[in-house]
Amino acid sequence: MEPQVGSILEGRVTGITKFGAFVALEGGRSGLVHISEIANTFVNDVHDFLQEGQTVKVLVLSAENGKINLSIKKALPREERPAPRPARPAGGAPRPAQSRPAQPRSFARAPQQPLPPSGDQSFEDKLKQFLSSSEGKMADLNRSIDGKRGGGRRRR
C-alpha cells in the first residue's frame, strides 16, 4: 500500500547520493528525498545534513508508479521554517523601489527634452511624439553599439 500524500512518516536514511538521500519507510517501502528538499538552506553536500542510519521525519510529496518523493524540510514544524518572502502587492505592481536605482539609465547622448502636458494632445500626436523620440534613442544606441563592435570602416 502506497503512503498517503501529505502524511508525515518516520524513516531511516539508507543511502546518500549527490542528488539526495534514500529513506526506508515502514512496510518495506523506500523513497527519495531530493537535495532541494533536505533543508531550508542551500545544500551543497547531503553529507553535511544527513548520515546513513539516521532517523528522520519526512513528508510524502508524491507516490506514483512505486516511486515515493519525500521532503524533510516540509515535515518541519511551522516555527522552524523560514518566513516566506513577501508577496507582490495586488494587481501585479512591482515591489517598492528600495533595490532599484533612483533614475533609469538613459542611453541617449543628447539631453532629453521634457514632454509637454498631455491633456491637449490627441492620441495620434502622442504616438508620433513617442515614435520619433524612440527612433532617436534607438539610433543613438545603435551608433554606440557599432562603435564598440568595430563596425566602422577598416583602414588599409
Image (spheres, grey):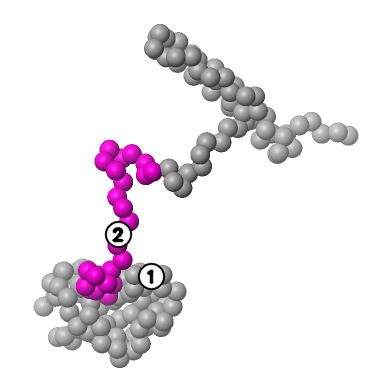
Residue 78 visible in image: yes
Q: Position of residue 2 (x, y in %)?
A: 14, 75
Quadrant of residue 63 within the rendered picture: bottom left
Q: Residue at x 22, y 80 (%)?
A: 57
Q: Residue at x 37, y 44 (%)?
A: 95
Q: Which residue is mark 2?
A: 84
Left or right: 73 with respect to 28? right
Left or right: 76 with respect to 135? left
Label 2 sits on what residue type? Answer: Pro
119 and 21: which one is in front? 119
Checking the image for residue 80, the label placed there is none
Checking the image for residue 41, the label placed there is 1
Judging from the image, what secondary structure is the residue with disc 1 in?
loop
74 is within the stretch colored magenta = yes
Q: Which residues are magenta?
A: 69-96
Quadrant of residue 65 within the rendered picture: bottom left
Left or right: 102 with respect to 57? right
Q: Residue at x 62, y 24 (%)?
A: 111
Of callouts 2 and 1, the N-terminal one: 1
Q: Nearer the viewer, mark 2 or mark 1?
A: 2
35 is within the stretch colored magenta = no
Q: Position of residue 103 (x, y in %)?
A: 52, 36
Q: Position of residue 36 (x, y in %)?
A: 35, 69
Tell me how far mark 2 sits from mark 1, CA to CA. Answer: 13 Å
Q: Residue at x 35, y 87 (%)?
A: 51
